Every structure is written in C-alpha cells, then in structure tokens.
Image (cartoon, rainbow, N blue to C red):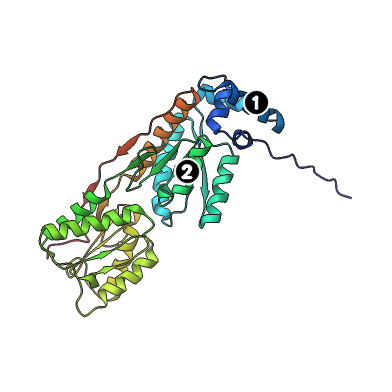
C-alpha cells in the first residue's frame, strides 16, 4: 500500500488579507511594515484579518527584497505575435538581471481566462504587473489592479491613461512618416492593411496613414484598405484581397511586420516582383523584417528598450510604494526610426 502524501495548504498571500479586510494590498503592506498613512481603524481591521487568516510574513523573502530590490513583476499577455513578445521579454530580462527583479509570465485568451490568469499572478504575490497590448487598454484589468494596490504599467498603449504608467512610441507619427516616405518615392495608389481593432496602436497607425494621404491631396481607394489582425495568417488573406485585383496598389503599408511578410509571400506566389513591381512596408521591425527576402522596409520600434524601460519604471514604483510613498505615474515615449531596406523602391 502506497504512502499518502499530504499536500500542504495553499499559502495565504498579502492579497488574500487585503480582500478579507476590504482594503488595498498597499494598506496591508504599510500596516505590516509599520509605515505611515494608515489610520488606527484600518490598521486594526488589517490586523484582525491577518489573525483570522493566520497570515505570516515570509521573512527570508522580505529580507532578500530589502537587500537587493528583488521584486517580483508579473507580465500578463495575450498578444498573438510571439516575435513581439520575445523582444519585450528580452529587454525585461536584461533589466531584471541588473536590478535583481524576477519576472513571472502568465498568458490568457478570453475574459474568463484573463481573470484566472490575473488571479494566479496576484496569488503568487507579484509586486507589480506589466500589461502588453491589447491588455494595456483593458479597463477591467487596470481597475482590478488599482483596487489591489498593485503598481501597473501599460506597455505600448496608443492611448495612455493619465494615472497608469506607460512606455510607448508615437504610433500616429510613425505611420505618418512611413506614408510620407512612400509618397516621396512617387507612390500614389497605396494599399493599407489594418491591425487588430482591439489594439489601440492599430487605430492610430491607420489614422496616421489617412492624414499623410490627405495632406498630399491623394484619394484613398476603399478597395485598397483591408482588415488584418496583426497575425501572419490575416496578412495572407489581406495580401490576396489586395493583389488579386485587376487594379492593384503600387505599394502596400501593413500595420505590422508579420502581416507585411505575409503580403510579400502572396506577391512571390503571384509572380509579382518586389520592389520593382510592388513596394511593401511594415511596422515594428521585429526579427522577421530581416529574415525574409527582400528585407523589409519598416518603422523600427525599440521593442527591447521598451521592455527594459518597463521593468525599470515599475521596479522604481514598487520600491517607492514599499517605502510608504505614493508612486506617481511615469509616461515615457521612445523614438522610432524608419528603416529603409530592400522591399521598397521609387515608383
């Protein structure tokens, strides 16, 4: 007969105490650390919940954090582009190795999965959370984290909230610059592949494209504007919709590199020469931009640096919060660069 292994009960976290007491996790942390800004009534309320849940502070972990700033930062993502996420994580890991912070990655899909993933991160005791797109614009997720007192950073949002830290580029200006570049090459009939409508950068990139066309007095053929989802598969469908027409554009601007790469693949399949017969451009400058043929003209978004900055900003805010201060939101706008490569040529 086998020996039964007794499972230890799940450890009570600071977030469990906060929910039990009806206060934020920040208030619980301040009470435990004997810091200011907690009224006697709230302090008694928190201490009563600590006793009721039999919560104990992990002193070794706490001492480690106090000595080396070893914060635990969660990354909650549902981005379909693995290349984009990999670049973000590379920058985040570079910064975390410097500061001693730990990164905890959790994925989700629909709303139910999102709530479960968020609950899992909170149960793990994360000190802060980074939200890449499209979750960077999820009011539900942001409000939940605010209620828990968890410092939050919206990464690559096109419409940052005043009270939530963010790191991003100016997507509107990036799309404006790329469209002006195509017009400068002599292109007048330009196709555009939209991105996922749930991502705020998608809308701004399209608006930037429209603005550049209108400022030059160019008509926009509705048949040359097609929908995409920032995925390679959606780019294939978009490429077929644009390039199998009797009248096709002389240039195509796709809202990200994955879709641009797919349009190039469709063009190759149809025997269309790039860039002699068709110019194709993308956005982001992920690794695929320089691994396809011809290499892709695109807007370079410093994704690694954005990931690094996100961890640095959030680490500082966590440190301020643990000192009993109220961290102020930080909004950092990174520079983009237009990378001219082999997929574009004068008309």
**Residue 281 % position (x, y):** 24, 60
The residue at the point 40 percent across, 43 percent down is 154
Whether residues under marks 1 and 2 lie with C-beta atoms below 8 angstroms apart, the answer is no
Task: Tell me where residue 298 appears, x and y as whole percent.
Answer: 25, 55
Q: List the residue tagged with mark 2.
A: 143
Q: Quadrant of the C terminus?
A: bottom left
Label 2: element kind? helix
Q: Which mark is residue 63?
A: none
Q: Which residue occupies the extreme right position in the image?
A: 1
Residue at numbered disc 1: 47
Confirm whether residue 68 shows in the render: yes
Helix or strand or loop: what does disc 1 sit on?
helix
Q: Position of residue 77 (x, y in %)?
A: 47, 50
Residue 291 seen in the figure: no
Residue at the spot 55% in from the left edge and 55% down from the top edge: 112
Task: Using the image as rendered, state which of residue 148 and residue 171 is in the foreground.
Answer: 148
> In the shown orientation, is residue 174 left or right of residue 73?
left
């Amino acid at each position: 007969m086998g020996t039964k292994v007794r499972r230890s009960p799940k450890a009570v976290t600071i977030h469990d105490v906060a929910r039990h007491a009806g206060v934020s996790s920040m208030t619980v942390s301040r009470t435990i650390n004997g810091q200011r800004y907690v009224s006697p009534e709230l302090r008694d309320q928190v201490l009563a919940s600590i006793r009721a849940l039999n919560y104990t502070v992990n002193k070794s972990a706490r001492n480690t954090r106090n000595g080396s700033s070893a914060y635990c930062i969660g990354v909650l993502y549902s981005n379909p582009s693995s290349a984009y996420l990999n670049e973000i994580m590379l920058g985040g890991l570079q910064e975390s190795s410097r500061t001693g912070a730990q990164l905890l990655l959790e994925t989700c899909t629909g709303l139910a999965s999102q709530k479960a993933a968020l609950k899992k991160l909170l149960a793990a005791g994360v000190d802060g959370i980074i939200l890449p797109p499209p979750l960077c614009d999820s009011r539900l997720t942001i409000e939940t984290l605010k209620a828990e007192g968890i410092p939050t950073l919206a990464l690559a949002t096109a419409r940052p909230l005043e009270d939530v830290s963010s790191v991003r580029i100016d997507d509107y200006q990036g799309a404006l610059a790329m469209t002006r570049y195509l017009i400068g090459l002599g292109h007048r009939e330009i196709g555009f592949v939209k991105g996922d409508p749930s991502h705020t950068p998608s809308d701004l990139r399209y608006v930037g494209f429209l603005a550049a066309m209108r400022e030059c007095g160019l008509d926009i053929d509705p048949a040359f504007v097609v929908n995409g989802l920032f995925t390679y598969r959606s780019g294939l469908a978009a490429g077929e919709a644009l390039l199998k027409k009797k009248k096709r554009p002389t240039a195509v601007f796709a809202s990200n590199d994955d879709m641009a790469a797919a349009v190039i693949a469709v063009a190759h399949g149809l025997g269309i020469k790039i860039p002699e017969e068709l110019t194709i451009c993308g956005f982001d400058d992920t690794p695929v931009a320089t691994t396809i043929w011809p290499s892709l003209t695109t807007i370079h978004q410093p994704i690694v640096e954005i990931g690094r900055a996100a961890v640095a900003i959030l680490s500082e805010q966590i440190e301020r919060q643990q000192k009993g201060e109220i961290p102020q939101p930080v909004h950092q706008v990174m520079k983009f660069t237009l990378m001219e490569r082999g997929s574009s040529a004068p008309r």
